[in-house]
């Protein structure tokens, strides 16, 4: 495995994009909490500090704009490990570069579109469809990896 190998490079790009997206969700949560001056979770978050000069217990109440980002982040944390492992194992099957690109980048696209749908409050069916696309890609890669490992 080397970054000079186009197949492994494809995996690295896809994995890096999704990791960066997942990390960005933490930052977006912070931005939304600052904008709302609330949505905090821990009691110590409402102690008087230079960043919170007028603490209020209401700052611990759920804030939908903050909670939406948290839900997106939890969804990422549920799906990202599967992709990182399934994608890497799939690369070991030595698929064609074109197929690997379609699957790995297709998964990234489905997750980015899922993020957009969740962020903008699209109906459940849109999010579910985008989730299903990514799930089917993961299942395909995993089954293909299993079949190759079993010599089928």
Image: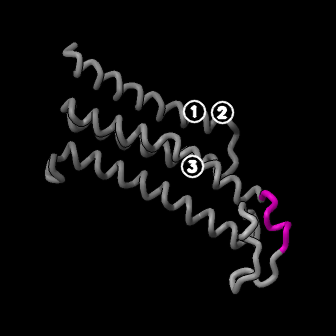
What secondary structure is found at the residue carrying circle 1? helix
Judging by the rendered image, the residue that carries numbered circle 2 is: 125
Q: Nearer the viewer, residue 58 or 99?
A: 58
Judging by the rendered image, the residue that carries numbered circle 3 is: 115
Where residue 149 appears, as percent x and y from the top left, is 23, 21
Q: Is residue 147 left or right of residue 3?
A: right
Position of the N terminus by quadrant: top left
Q: Residues within 10 Å of mark 2 (few under 14, many from 20)?
A: few
Q: Which residues are magenta?
A: 56-62
The Cα atoms of the two marked residues, 2 and 1, are separated by 6 Å
Q: Is residue 59 magenta?
A: yes
Residue at point 75%, 66% (across, down): 43
Where residue 118 appears, as percent x and y from the top left, is 64, 47
With respect to residue 129, does 67 lie above or below? Answer: below
With respect to residue 97, does 47 lie above or below? Answer: below
Kindly check if marks 2 and 3 are in contact, taking CB atoms under 8 A apart as contact: no
Judging by the rendered image, the residue that carries numbered circle 1 is: 129
What secondary structure is found at the residue carrying circle 2? helix
Q: Is residue 38 visible?
A: yes
The Cα atoms of the two marked residues, 2 and 3, are separated by 14 Å
> Mark 2 or mark 3, which has the lower sequence index?
3
With respect to residue 12, does 144 lie above or below? Answer: above
Where residue 114 appears, as percent x and y from the top left, is 56, 44
Q: Nearer the viewer, residue 54 or 106?
A: 54
Residue at point 45%, 27% (across, down): 136
Residue at point 23%, 16% (across, down): 150
Q: Is residue 103 visible?
A: no
Identity of the residue furthest to the top in this view: 152
Q: Quadrant of residue 95?
A: top left
> Mark 3 or mark 1, which has the lower sequence index?
3
Q: Residues within 10 Å of mark 1 (few under 14, many from 20)?
A: few
The Cα atoms of the two marked residues, 3 and 1, are separated by 12 Å
């Amino acid at each position: 495995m080397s970054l000079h190998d186009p197949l492994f490079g494809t995996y690295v790009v896809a994995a890096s994009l999704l990791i960066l997206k997942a990390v960005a969700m933490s930052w977006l949560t912070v931005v939304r909490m600052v904008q709302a001056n609330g949505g905090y979770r821990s009691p110590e978050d409402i102690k008087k500090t230079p960043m919170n000069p007028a603490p209020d217990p209401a700052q611990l109440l759920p804030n939908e704009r903050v909670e939406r980002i948290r839900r997106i982040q939890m969804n990422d944390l549920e799906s990202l490990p599967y992709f990182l492992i399934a994608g890497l194992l799939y690369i070991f099957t030595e698929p064609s570069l074109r197929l690997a690109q379609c699957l790995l980048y297709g998964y990234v696209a489905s997750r980015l579109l899922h993020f957009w749908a969740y962020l903008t409050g699209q109906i459940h069916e849109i999010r579910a469809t985008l989730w299903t696309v990514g799930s089917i890609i993961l299942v395909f890669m995993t089954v293909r990896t299993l079949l190759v490992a079993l010599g089928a």
